Amino acid sequence: FAGIPAIVGPFQTVDFRASLSQAVFNLSALRNYLAAKHEFEAAKLSVDDARDMVVLAVGNAYLTVVADAARVESVRAQVDTAKVSLDQASAQHAAGTAPKLDELRARVDYQTQQQALIQAQNDFEKDKIALARAIGLPLDQQFTLSDAVPYAELTKIDQQAAIQQALDARADLKTLREQVRAAQAVKGAARAERYPSASISGDYGDIGITPGHSHGTGEVAGQVSAPIFEEPKLRGDLKVADAQLQQRLAQLSDGEAQVRADVINSLLDLEASAKLVEASRSNVELTAEALKEAQDRYAAGVSDNLAVSQAQTSVAQANDQYVSGLYEHNLAKLSLARALGRARASYKTYLGEK
């Protein structure tokens, strides 16, 4: 148009503004927030459960090394006994009062015990390495166990009371319960997606040609939103959330059953291992007496050393069963502490205040 410039301006405008928006009502977001809180609590409880498992793993490794040390000492004593029998058979054969067979039999027994000692010492060193790894020591670190964890019988434990205590105290069950609550909140959030949500927003600022020639302006607005054409999506979200909830409930039910089984199995192992310790202890005494009797008869020339060889084998088996019984009994006590959810707090009490 004639008289109108092709370019208008330039114009300068300065605008400094701050904005704020806030949800006033959003039930779905609130329930998602509650679900996140429960998941966070479940994660913390999972750490507690992992620490209980660390106590059980380290305790098992420690008890294994203790049993290995006892087994090494037992086999070393059997080597010494076999050496005495070998010297006795050699002397009697040299004197012509015993056949060569007695000396050969005694030598076989002696070498067999030497082989058992080598194997026991090797197992002891390997299990010490496993213990060092479990507690985080350098593998070349030399250490000696300070506590031998002697036999100490637990007082009678009521099974139903123990099960109830485990159901209340186990961190893994608490984790599952928190996960169920989180899944319930997620399902509630999926259901609440149908509800309207309200929000408010506003801004205030200063606008003008220059900061010196400006004035304040502001705006406040409210908004209500509601889903209208999203019913298939909402139904799908609800079904997914319900499936997750049912899965969590099934895991909780299985976890409670597992806790009951853990307690009952630990109590059964504890009772059986205590009986095994008592029986094997008596067997050690009887086989030692039988060995002494056989050695005396052989020294008196009443019989050959076959009875001595058999008695030495019985002594070795009885000592090995006794060591195994002690290990199983202490492990059963530690497993019971884990089953009750008290591994970190009470493992010393269950293992005999060591």
Image (cartoon, rainbow, N blue to C red):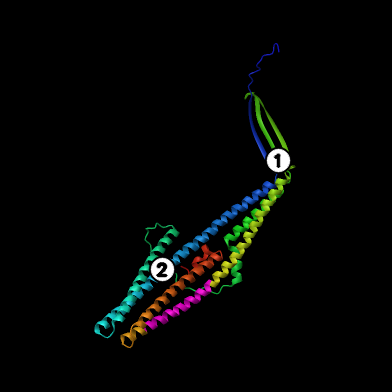
Residue 163 numbered mark, or none = none
Name the quadrant containing residue 221. Answer: top right
Quadrant of residue 301 within the rendered picture? bottom left
Vertical side of 121 occupied by 181: above or below:
above
Q: Is residue 207 left or right of residue 350?
A: right
Which residue is rendered at x = 69% and y = 48% of the image?
Answer: 236
Q: Which residues are magenta?
A: 269-292
- Whether residue 78 can be seen here: yes
**Label 2 sits on residue:** 68
What element does badge 2 sit on?
helix
Kindly identify the amino acid type of the residue bearing the numbered disc 2. Answer: Asp
- Residue furthest left as drawn: 95
First reached walking from the N terminus: tag 2 or tag 1 = 2
**Viewer-side label of 2, 1:** 2
What is the secondary structure assignment of the residue under circle 1?
Answer: strand
Horizontal side, residue 114 vs residue 175: left or right:
left
- Kindly identify the residue that appears in the image at 47 percent across and 76 percent down: 277
| Residue 166 in sight from this viewpoint | no
Counting from the top left corner in percent of width and height, residue 211 is at 62, 25
Coordinates of residue 157 in the picture (x, y in percent): 56, 72
Residue ID for mark 1: 199
Residue 224 in percent (x, y) is at: 73, 40
Q: Is residue 279 one of those drawn in magenta?
A: yes
Q: Is residue 144 magenta?
A: no
Q: Main secondary structure of the magenta part?
A: helix
Mark 1 belongs to which amino acid? Ser
**Residue in the foreground of this view, choosing between 245 and 148:** 245
